[in-house]
Every structure is written in C-alpha cells, then in structure tokens.
Image (spheres, helix red, strand yellow):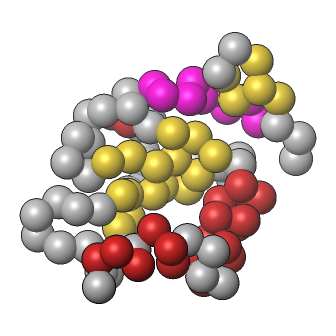
Amino acid sequence: MMLQIQHGQIQAGSNDYDNGMPATKLHGARWLKSRRSNSQGNCVEIAELPGGQVAMRNSRHPEGPALIYSRPEIEALILGAKDGDFDHLFASRN
C-alpha cells in the first residue's frame, strides 16, 4: 500500500488522517499501552488504524493530538528500541 503525505495529511486507500488530529476523532481506535506503563500515566498509547497505519497519543492527554505513522516507520522504531538504539537516552537515570 502506498501512502501519500500532503500538507500533513496521510492518505491510504479511502482513509484520511491528519497528523496531529485530535485522538478522539479516530473513531473505533482501540488504544493499547505497554505492560511497563505505571499508574501515574507515564505512557504512550498506540492504535492500529484501518489501512495499517499506527496512531500514537500521550495517555495523560487522550483527547490531545495523535501522531500517525506508517507501518514501516513503527517497525523501524520498535526494532531500533529492541536493538538498543535508544539506550543512551536512559543511561543518566542509573
């Protein structure tokens, strides 16, 4: 599937999503969060959208903006995290 991005709008098939649109406008989205999330709301939630894109939002602001990514973008992020590409961001916490 080919995605076209024009002026912040992501189009895939018949589904149009504006990057940064209110997450509440993603009707039917089933938001998921990591098992590692804590009760203080320190988590990012993700939802798969029709057409295969993935939306992300801040759990502390569920009505806030949703960032929309293609499946290859999310795959690169997750595989990079698994490979330790971002470990340096947490090195100062130890």
Looking at the image, residue 94 sits to the left or right of residue 86; the answer is left
Looking at the image, residue 50 sits to the left or right of residue 12; the answer is left
Q: Is residue 16 magenta?
A: yes
Residue 76 location in percent, x, y? 72, 65
> Which residue appears farthest toward the front when viewing the image?
92
Q: Is residue 50 visible?
A: no
Residue 28 location in percent, x, y? 42, 45
Residue 50 location in percent, x, y? 63, 47
Q: Is residue 13 above or below residue 21?
A: below
Q: Is residue 31 above or below residue 61?
A: below
| Residue beneath the point at 71% across and 55% down | 73
> Which residue appears farthest toward the left when viewing the image?
40
| Residue beneath the point at 26% across and 34% down | 63
**Labels in figure, total:** 0
> Which residue appears farthest toward the top when viewing the image?
7
Magenta segment, which residues?
A: 11-21
| Residue beneath the point at 35% across and 67% down | 33
Q: Is residue 27 visible?
A: yes
Q: Which residue is at the front of the view, 78 or 32?
A: 78
| Residue beneath the point at 69% across and 14% down | 7
- Report the quarter where the C terminus lies: bottom left
Q: Which residue is at the front of the view, 29 or 32?
A: 32
